[in-house]
């Protein structure tokens, strides 16, 4: 059975149908094509791809991509560094915090002692902590079709987007991302709601007042859009819009593009995303790791052949080796316990804590810490530890294999069974009766502004025997400690960030070779404190396109083709003509039918038969004659051969001028111009129709008629 002929259509028009109107419509088209593929390409007017940046934090991104009539939000990270400008929320009354003096301007003209408090030379807001949410004025967020989530840290702003912008789309995420993201949101809401504050500080946000405040409040960005924490009801409503996906699963969006998550190797269920149409490919790389830890390894091969690669979520600690930080963590912990002190580890309830507990499992016996109690305190501590054990298919191969032995994939299960690790929802209840020192406490929040960690800072901060070890890289430890000064306890900074560093990402980009790279502006220049370190930035050819908060990028990528399907009966009617070996063309007259971003060439419907008239006609009416379509022309007019032909016909005085698009021939004696261009030939001849006809026929000798 012969193959059905198919064509590359050469016309340049496409009917655009909006998704809101079901994308229905049809156009009658006529063109010619080259038989090269099973599905023809419809050449369209070049449409730009746009990227909107709604977050200024490179590791907590929120971007919107407009591509092929779809609007896709890439992550919705919540910038929690804004809480460092607020006073901590103690679980019990703190006499120290309540006695802090209020702030009054030096000249006495501005009195904000009810809103701002001074501590150790810095000014803090005395109010419920607020978060810097993604920008909402840059574009209409109700037009977003889908939200793609990379990992549970990059979904913390989801309720602000889905519940307050008119969003009606779908959110896509893996199951671990959804479940652990739910735990982190639940924990955050719990921290805020159990220590409510009656007063709300707003006057300091006035632009004129903020201008005279001391730093860092003076330099805080977009303070007028900072928001208080959402409620649990909003969390449940937002997460009800999440649809679960698995690695490499293809999800079609309105027939326009396909999206697919890939393992990024950073955390349980973390993903990079491929956004692909028939002829274009965009890769979104966010929060990825090449280190061998507990998640599935990163899928690199699927990122190849990308037209655009959007890169974000690189390590915040490019000079800190994670293995070296783990070693320092263990050694400082052991030194403090042996000296009779306590260790406080501010951390999230999921993520790095799994690696810390696994490291300690191997370290406890060798360091003679077998009798030291380890406490994990969080409203979601029990759920977090259980989830890490049941998501076996999302773990690396070594941990997956343990499930079939059967053994728990993480060793903290054994620590719990032997009572070396105990977990509690809060410091109240069972913990207060079982608590003994010296001990190690893992608790949140890493910002030291809310959660049970505030209580331990007040309890242990006055003794130099105790140590606080910072492992989360999201917050400056000096800023986190500022409202607790003067502080006697020792501070150790061991940030553990397994995400890609600049050396690793440069090697990755050389392997996958995208045509264009888009990244935050932070990655295109060295850190301000290490301006000489050119190795701490991205150096690519061509240079990456940088973006910052509230910027809109027209990406250097243009869509040119659409895939068009041709019905078998129409394909059977085509009669290709070979114009050169291996290349055939055919004319086609058809109806272009577009629905849900799928385009189909259909035969032109025949007119309905005319019903017979009751009156007898003297003369039989002849059916209307359908004129044959005019032949289409193909080929190019060779300059030298054409000049020779003109000389044979007595036209010798020809002046040739070269242009950007071809040549202009000036027939001086005949006062006539002939423009020979790549996409057309024009004859300008006034009041001499016989000459124009002759020149036209000479041009046609060099072209092939279809």
Image (cartoon, rainbow, N blue to C red):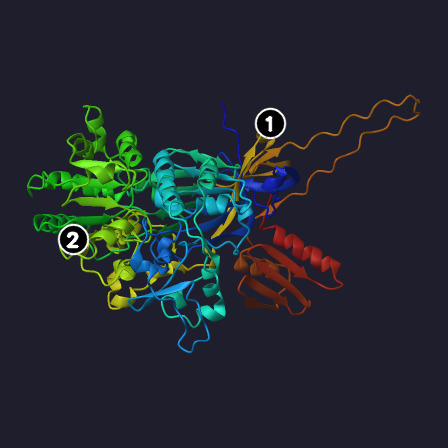
Q: Residue 615, labelled with which disc? A: none
Residue 213 vertical placement versus 336 (above, below): below
Residue 497 vertical placement versus 379 (above, below): below
Residue 242 vertical placement versus 99 (above, below): above
Residue that mark 2 sits on: 466
For the question of whether residue 578 can be seen, the reply is: no
For the question of whether residue 689 can be seen, the reply is: yes
Residue that mark 1 sits on: 569
Q: Residue 674 falls in which quadrant of the image? A: bottom right
- 495 vs 216, left or right, is left
- 672 vs 252, left or right, is right
Which label sits in the foreground, 2 or 1? Answer: 2
Q: Residues within 10 Å of mark 2 (few under 14, many from 20)?
A: many
Instruction: Describe the element under mark 1 as helix, strand or loop.
Output: helix
Q: Residue 459: give x, y in percent of width and height.
A: 23, 52
Between 479 and 392, which is closer to the camera in this rendering? 479
- 319 vs 181, left or right, is left
Q: Residue 541: give x, y in percent of width and height.
A: 33, 59
Q: Residue sitting at 45 percent across and 46 percent down? A: 230
The mark nearer the N terminus, 2 or 1, is: 2
- 617 vs 214, left or right, is right
Q: Residue 242: give x, y in percent of width and height.
A: 45, 36
Q: Residue 665: give x, y in percent of width and height.
A: 60, 65
Q: Residue sitting at 16 percent across and 53 percent down? A: 466
Q: Residue sitting at 9 percent across and 41 percent down? A: 369
Q: Quadrant of the C terminus?
A: top right
Instruction: Describe the element under mark 2 as helix, strand or loop.
Output: loop
Between 408 and 318, which is closer to the camera in this rendering? 408
Q: Residues within 10 Å of mark 1 (few under 14, many from 20)?
A: few
Q: Are marks 2 and 1 in contact (CB under 8 Å)?
A: no
Q: Residue 666 falls in which quadrant of the image? A: bottom right
Q: CA distance from mark 2 to mark 1?
A: 82 Å
């Amino acid at each position: 059975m012969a193959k059905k002929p198919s064509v590359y259509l050469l016309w340049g028009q496409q009917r655009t149908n909006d998704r809101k109107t079901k994308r229905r419509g049809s156009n009658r088209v006529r063109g010619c094509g080259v038989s090269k593929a099973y599905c023809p390409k419809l050449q369209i007017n070049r449409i730009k791809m746009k990227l909107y940046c709604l977050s200024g934090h490179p590791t907590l991104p929120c971007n919107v991509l407009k591509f092929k009539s779809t609007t896709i939000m890439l992550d919705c990270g919540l910038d929690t560094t804004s809480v460092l400008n607020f006073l901590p929320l103690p679980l019990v009354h703190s006499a120290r915090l309540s006695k802090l003096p209020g702030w009054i301007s030096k000249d006495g003209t501005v009195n904000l002692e009810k809103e701002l408090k001074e501590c150790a030379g810095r000014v803090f807001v005395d109010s419920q902590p607020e978060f810097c949410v993604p920008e909402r004025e840059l574009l209409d967020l109700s037009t977003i079709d889908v939200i793609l989530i990379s990992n549970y840290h990059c979904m913390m702003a989801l309720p602000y987007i889905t519940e307050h912008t008119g969003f009606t789309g779908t959110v896509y995420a893996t199951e671990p991302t959804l479940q652990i993201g739910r735990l982190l949101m639940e924990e955050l809401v719990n921290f805020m709601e159990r220590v409510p504050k009656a007063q709300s500080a707003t006057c300091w946000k006035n632009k004129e007042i903020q201008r005279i405040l001391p730093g860092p409040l003076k330099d805080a960005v977009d303070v007028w859009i900072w928001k208080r924490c959402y409620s649990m009801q909003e969390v449940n409503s937002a997460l009800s819009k999440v649809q679960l996906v698995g690695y490499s699963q293809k999800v079609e969006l309105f027939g326009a593009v396909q999206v697919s998550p890939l393992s990024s190797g950073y955390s349980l269920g973390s993903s990079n995303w491929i956004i692909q149409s028939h002829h274009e490919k965009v890769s979104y790389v966010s929060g990825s790791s090449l280190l061998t830890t507990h998640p599935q390894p990163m899928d690199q091969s699927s990122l190849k052949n990308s037209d655009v690669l959007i890169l974000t979520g690189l390590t915040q600690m490019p000079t800190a080796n994670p293995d070296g930080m783990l070693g320092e963590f263990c050694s400082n912990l052991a030194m403090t316990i042996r000296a009779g002190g306590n260790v406080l580890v501010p951390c999230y309830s999921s993520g790095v804590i799994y690696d810390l507990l696994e490291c300690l499992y191997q370290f406890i016996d060798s360091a003679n810490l077998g009798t030291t109690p380890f406490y994990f305190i969080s409203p979601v501590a029990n759920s977090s530890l259980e989830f890490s054990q049941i998501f076996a298919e999302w773990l690396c191969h070594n941990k997956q294999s343990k499930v079939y032995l059967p053994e728990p994939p993480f060793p903290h299960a054994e620590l719990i069974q032997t009572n070396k690790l105990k977990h509690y929802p809060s410091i109240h209840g069972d913990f207060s009766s079982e608590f003994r020192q010296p001990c190690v406490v893992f608790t949140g929040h890493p910002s030291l502004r809310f959660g049970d960690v505030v209580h331990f800072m007040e309890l242990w901060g006055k003794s130099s025997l105790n140590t606080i070890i910072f492992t989360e890289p999201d917050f400056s430890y000096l800023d986190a400690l500022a409202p607790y000064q003067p502080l006697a306890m020792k501070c150790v900074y061991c940030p553990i960030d397994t995400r890609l560093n600049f050396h690793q990402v440069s090697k990755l980009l050389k392997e996958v070779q995208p045509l264009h790279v888009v990244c935050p502006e932070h990655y295109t220049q060295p850190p301000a404190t290490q301006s000489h370190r050119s190795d701490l930035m991205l150096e690519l050819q061509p240079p990456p396109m940088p973006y910052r908060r509230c910027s809109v990028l027209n990406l250097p990528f243009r869509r040119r083709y659409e895939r068009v399907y041709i019905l078998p009966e129409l394909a059977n009617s085509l009669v290709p003509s070979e114009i050169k070996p291996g290349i055939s063309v055919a004319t086609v007259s058809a109806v272009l039918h577009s629905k849900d971003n799928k385009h189909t060439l259909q035969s032109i419907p025949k007119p309905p038969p005319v019903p017979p008239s009751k009156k007898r006609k003297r003369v039989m009416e002849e059916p209307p004659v359908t004129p044959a379509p005019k032949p289409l022309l193909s080929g190019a007019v060779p300059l030298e051969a054409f000049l020779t032909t003109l000389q044979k016909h007595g036209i010798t005085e020809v002046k040739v001028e070269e242009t950007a698009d071809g040549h202009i021939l000036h027939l001086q004696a005949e006062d006539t111009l002939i423009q020979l261009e790549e996409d057309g030939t024009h004859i300008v001849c006034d009041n001499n129709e016989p000459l124009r006809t002759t020149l036209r026929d000479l041009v046609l000798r060099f072209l092939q008629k279809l």
